Amino acid sequence: MKNISILGATGSVGTQALEVVAANPGLYKVAALTAQSNSALLIEQARAFQPELVVIGDECLYEQVKSALSGTNIRVAAGEAAISEAAGLSGVDLVLTAIVGSAGLKPTIAAIEAGADIALANKETLVVAGDLITSLAKTHGVSIIPVDSEHSAIYQCLVGEDYKALEKIYLTASGGPFRGKDRDFLANVTKLEALKHPNWVMGAKITIDSASLMNKGLEVIEAKWLFGLETDQIDVIVHPQSIVHSIAQFNDGSMKAQMGLPDMKLPIHFAMAYPDRISTDFERFNFIDYPELNFYKPDTSTFRNLDLAYTALRKGGNMPCIINAANEVVVSAFLQDKIGFLEMSDVIEECMETIQFIAKPGLNNYLETDVHTRIFADELVTK
Ligand code: NDP
Ligand code: MG
């Protein structure tokens, strides 16, 4: 039985991971569950899965969770530091990091230092501090197994391959709800339109990132660290059907793609079960339902975020951290109707030009960059 903790258990990835646990009795034991503010769902999950520890990020909700779980053997804690404590619980085989945003960084470090393998959904952690996280994982002999569907695809294509033979990868992008639209159209789109993803049901932040192509930008950076690639070895191709989840190309010209219906439970299950493959009753892909699979070049003059992410990756240092923090602020501002869709890229670009660049950052530099960028971006969005 695999002992597994889920950080961000109440989110889109977290709840699907618990569905996988429930569907496979005897395979997984839940050690710790965390949430930020959804105490009702966390309590329900704790009762159903009987973890050793549950943590609610918002300390004001501690008493509520504690009293709801009194009379059980479940330990309850609250606050940011307690989330890292949950991540670093001893005796855990795998920590699924499904927190959204750079808030996942410190808990991921705690999990790695405790020697647990990481099933990584929280891509922002690798965007912010990919060098630090991957070298820490190496030091502690910890595997990072991607949950993000594109990276899971590449990971699956690389099983049994020598990474040195990998020439390049193609990350596929659905193009989101605004594929094919121009800047005049985008100037007036609402959050409700942006939240309607054509193929995936996900948390609000990543859904907006998908509409703005920032999600693909973050994924390019994530891929660099997961697979040890140079920027020029990572390409993005728009594939509206989201059936080909990504493609690995080798040095003999051969290409491998991983395919399947767009269902996050598949990569979640793969990461949880790895190195095993466990049978599922998930709906199977049928070629006859998809007579055409299409592929297009991304429109980066309309959707500027992808180019901004490539620029950040080429620049290196704390630049990806800057882009991530600025993006978290603008997405939240867009969701609160404070700024328009196109302004998101403008604010991010201004942060990249203004925040102090650090070529070789350490953890404290990343944490400070995150704070400084948020303050500056906040000023820009409230101007
Ligand atoms: P959700 O917004 O649905 O869930 C986020 C989870 O993190 C919730 O449990 C939330 O708690 C918790 N959380 C939010 N803020 C904080 C914080 N400051 N500190 C600690 N915990 C916090 O996100 P998703 O599940 O969509 O995404 C999670 C991660 O997985 C993201 O990094 C995303 O990019 C990545 N990902 C998601 C995919 C998807 O299909 N959803 C696909 C690929 C990657 P609460 O509910 O209490 O607010
Ligand atoms: Mg993805």
Image: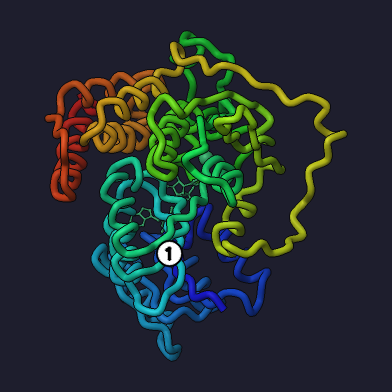
Q: Nearer the viewer, residue 223 or 302?
A: 223
Q: Is residue 276 left or right of residue 138?
A: right
For the point 51% across and 31% down, which residue is it? 167
Colour option used: rainbow
For the point 60% across and 44% down, which residue is it? 157
Q: Residues within 10 Å of mark 1 (few under 14, many from 20)?
A: many
Decide: is 237 above or below 82: above
Residue 273 in the image, given as x and y percentages of width and height: 59, 64
**Quadrant containing the N terminus in the rendered view:** bottom right
Residue 287 in the image, given as x and y percentages of width and height: 83, 35
The answer to which image quadrant residue 22 occupies is: bottom right
For the point 46% across and 10% down, which residue is it? 183
The answer to whether any part of residue 60 appears in the image is: no
The answer to whether any part of residue 190 appears in the image is: yes
Label 1: which secondary element: strand
Q: Which residue is mark 1?
A: 117
Q: Nearer the viewer, residue 16 or 298?
A: 298
- Three-letter amino acid code of the residue under disc 1: Asp
Residue 47 in the image, given as x and y percentages of width and height: 52, 79
Decide: is 275 above or below 151: below
The answer to which image quadrant residue 116 occupies is: bottom left
Decide: is 2 above or below 183: below
Q: Give the number of marks.
A: 1
Q: Is residue 314 left or right of residue 289?
A: left
The answer to which image quadrant residue 7 occupies is: bottom left
